Amino acid sequence: MARTAERVPVAPGGGRADGVDERPAEASAGTAGALARPAPAGARRPPLALLVGAGAGLLLATLVVTVTVGSADLAVLEVVRSVLSHLGLPVEGVPRLHDAIVWDLRMPRVLTAAAVGAGLAVAGAVMQSLTRNPLADPYLLGLSSGASVGAAGVLLLGLAVVLPVAAFVGALAALLATLALARGSGGALTPARVVLAGLAVSQLAAAATAFVVFWTAKGDSYQQILSWLMGSLAGATWGSVGIAVVALLVVGAVLATWAGRLDAFAFGDQAAGALGVDPNRTRWLLLTAVALLTGALVSVSGSIGFVGLLVPHAVAPLTGASHRRLLPVAALAGAVLLVWADTVARTAFDPRELPVGIVTALLGAPLFAWLLRRSRGAAWS
Amino acid sequence: MSHRRALTAVALLALVVPLAACAAGMPATSPAATSAAAAVPPEPSSSGPATAAFAPVTVDNCGTRVTVDAPPQRVVTIKSTPTEMLLALGLADRIVGVGFQDGPVPDRWAAQAASLPVISDKVPDQEAVLELAPDFVYGGWESNFSAEGAGERPALAGRGIASYVSPAACQEPEHQPDPLTFDEVFREITQVGAIFGVPDRAAALVDQEKAALAAITPVSGVSAFWWSSGNDAPYAGGGIGAPQLIMTAAGVTNILADVHATWAPAGWEAVVAADPDVLVLVDASWNTYDHKVEVLSSNPALSQLTAVREHRFVRVPFASTEAGVRNVEAAASVAQQVRDLGLGG
Amino acid sequence: MELTIAGVGTRLGGRWVVDGVDATPPAGGLTGLLGPNGAGKTTLLRLIAGLLPAEAGAVLVSSDDAGVVDGVASHGAGAARIGGPAVPVTSLPRRQRARRIALLEQESSAAVPLLVHEVVALGRVPYRSWWGADPDGGAVGRALAAAGAAHLADRSWGSLSGGERQRVHIARALAQEPELLLLDEPTNHLDVSAQLSLLSFVRTLAVTAVAALHDLNLAATFCDHVLVLSAGRLAAAGAPADVLTPELLREVYHVDADVLTHPATGRPVIAFSGGVPAVAPQG
């Protein structure tokens, strides 16, 4: 909460030219001089190198562990041998099918989950900053709804297009519609307009998807679109690893270099302008970057919810809101989260599988509640 | 509203004639009903006079009490299994509309089916159903009776229209067969026969099915995976539904036999780990046999399955994979196809 | 920095909110920008900062002889000044402009989830490399110290008092190492002691400062030069003692006042006696 700045008049401190506003007897809550009150928890933030190192280590450990877990009961040694043999090392061979499970099913899935989780977390953090809205997520611009229309077209109407391409095209179409709708006079993109335009486009695209589902529903065909709408990594291939990783690295590089400019928005557009940042141009460019990233991710995994919304809030108390620190740590945290969520999705009800979007939703709601209770207004009050 | 008058006339005759016939010992098929549609040659095995007086039938159907005072004469069927049930019992003439069919009917009924009026490719809505002035709506799934669909069951009952769901498709745990058995399937035939006043034909059909079932020599030592729909994560036959029933009768072992569901979304990893001997691929218009074969062949992991490398596929049309009058023939077909692949002894 | 405001004006929504203002704030001094609400003070500050394009006239600044300036000829009345020829402020590249001009707007009440040193670090944005590294690692610390806010460095923004926030805003502005400091009503929400210490502090800085003020006595006490705006136009400009006369106060502010002289400093002191109903409707 912003504190009111009304002050209770106290003993005159004189007009010292370089003095500090000392308030020996402060009546307003919590504003005693720095000496009287210790700095709030988290004031000393862990150094970035430590956070990134710990995050990377955790991610690596996660990948190693989760690739050995699955509904097929494979010995850890077998998994290791399979991976090593594909990396070109001369190791003892592994039965053909077990090798297929490890290298063609689990590895792509785990790696795609990591890339998608990282990408969604970063996209979510940037969206929240751009729209100055802590409830923003990467799909705000109608991206996931647009991608769903594309996916529904392929899965239900039988469009002869590769699914990721159709989903990506759908996402971009939704983005263009949102930006066109949000564009005020003179090309100004204000956060409020972007949010509202994105909502409108999302609703429209969701209605279109629902229409297609209803129109084509036959037998158990709804199963196919349902898992896509909830978000699922079941169809991950090495191709999807490629798409997700490339999108993450390319857009991530753009976001990393513009992270400082994102910080400049903290005090509003005018202040950003005064700091040398063109608010409109920056916003257009960053929104486009986020949209491209999200579009690529949604095209391989459907719309997995909660990762983009929650992970920035979860790491902000550790990193602070400075984007140079927030984005890399959020990426690592998102990757770890999604890999574990997907592992749960594919093993909890073995041999059945849940779409991972259900797991993230189940985890997400209580996690969000816990975060709200825990944060004493520190990071995202 | 000549429609209404015709209906009233039919209803009256349907009430009067069987009583008269009962008294006079004549066949009870009402003349109004037989004149409504083209003359239908009855199934050879289900011909023969219906027995004497029609007593009102009350059944508990998926938790709803259904009472039929007279054999329904104007039936709307939704999905294939109810349509085929009535065709098998020689009751094509009673069908005034079909909706949401899952696939073509077998050849032996093709001629009759061709003349059945199709209301909708999807679940018909209430107006479309009511427009036909039915007295009975027979649905293959409970969800067919929703407000956006044919109408909720109490609402239909309030309009004097009896509704009936294929009992194997009841969703409530206390009504869902667990597991589905052929006795359940035959019970439905018998029950429908009683409702429609053709108990003899029903009994004959059941006997015929039982004989066909007994004639199947199950294969042995063959494991199978039943793939119904879905691509990235297959929607598969579980351990307690019609797929399991068919597989058991055919003698193949379902790799998902321990999954306590009729159908369940499975993961490909479990399938690859189990490496089943054959793959049962359901042929549906929304996910065809050919599409499934293509997915299997092009997927780097799935193409390593023994069954895919050796092209051991069994084809089953979707309409025969839900509980109904085609399950026995499906089981026989599966057993035959497995043998044709050189497996199962 | 030499700053010349040459007949600058702009419209918002069809209305001239700043209309033909000519002024030359003294370099290195504190110039007060006065006028009732709605007179156009904030808009003029934004025009000076180059954030708004001028539809008429121009704001001219001396080009930085050490930096790169887009080759633009000087307009209008701008003559060559010390430090390079005068160029319109809007012709400077954004980043260069941000390194030379710092604007502190009125505080919005939006929550900012940053620590104080991160807020001050925002002032370094115009200097950061593409990777985001600050070439001068000590700049933030120096700015905090200069603003007397070094002890607040690790506090969270939300926990600061109004006076502390203003200190930090000043530190952020100082981190930009500007030659021109623009302040929009910096003394709002501050109590008397904080107002006095802030303005006397600004006077000690070696920058040209222009501050929009609503408190006339503060302006009289601290400003070397004042500009009085009324309905977008410049009503008067000059030293406070010359400008702040009872007649001007009646005409611009619609108040009755006597102007006295402070016994110790010699500065004008305005003693209000009452409001005067406006003769004509406020433009």
Image: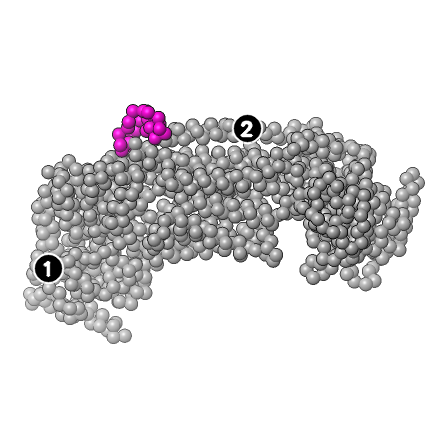
Nearest the eye: B76 or C204 = C204
Q: Position of residue B305 (x, y in %)?
A: 24, 37
Nearest the eye: B264 or A190 = A190
Q: Residue furthest bottom?
A: B2
Q: Position of residue C262 (x, y in %)?
A: 91, 42
Q: Which residues are magenta?
A: A72-98
User: What residue is shown at x 55% (from left), y 32% (from top)?
Assistant: A318
Check disc 1 and report its element: helix, strand or loop. Answer: loop
Q: Position of residue A326 (x, y in %)?
A: 55, 36
User: From the viewer's perspective, is the residue at label 1 or at label 2 nearer?
Assistant: 2
Quadrant in the picture for residue A110: top left
User: What residue is shown at x 66% (from left), y 43% (from top)?
Assistant: C95
Q: Give the amino acid at mark 1.
A: Glu
Query: The N terminus of chain A is located in which quarter?
Result: top right
Above or below, B92 relative to B315: below
Q: Position of residue B121 (x, y in %)?
A: 28, 60
Answer left or right for C259 relative to C10: right
Q: Is residue A287 visible?
A: yes
Check disc 2 and report its element: helix, strand or loop. Answer: helix
Which chain hosts label 2? A
Q: Which residue is mark 2?
A: A49
Q: Which residue is mark 1?
A: B43
Query: Is A80 contained in the magenta span?
Result: yes
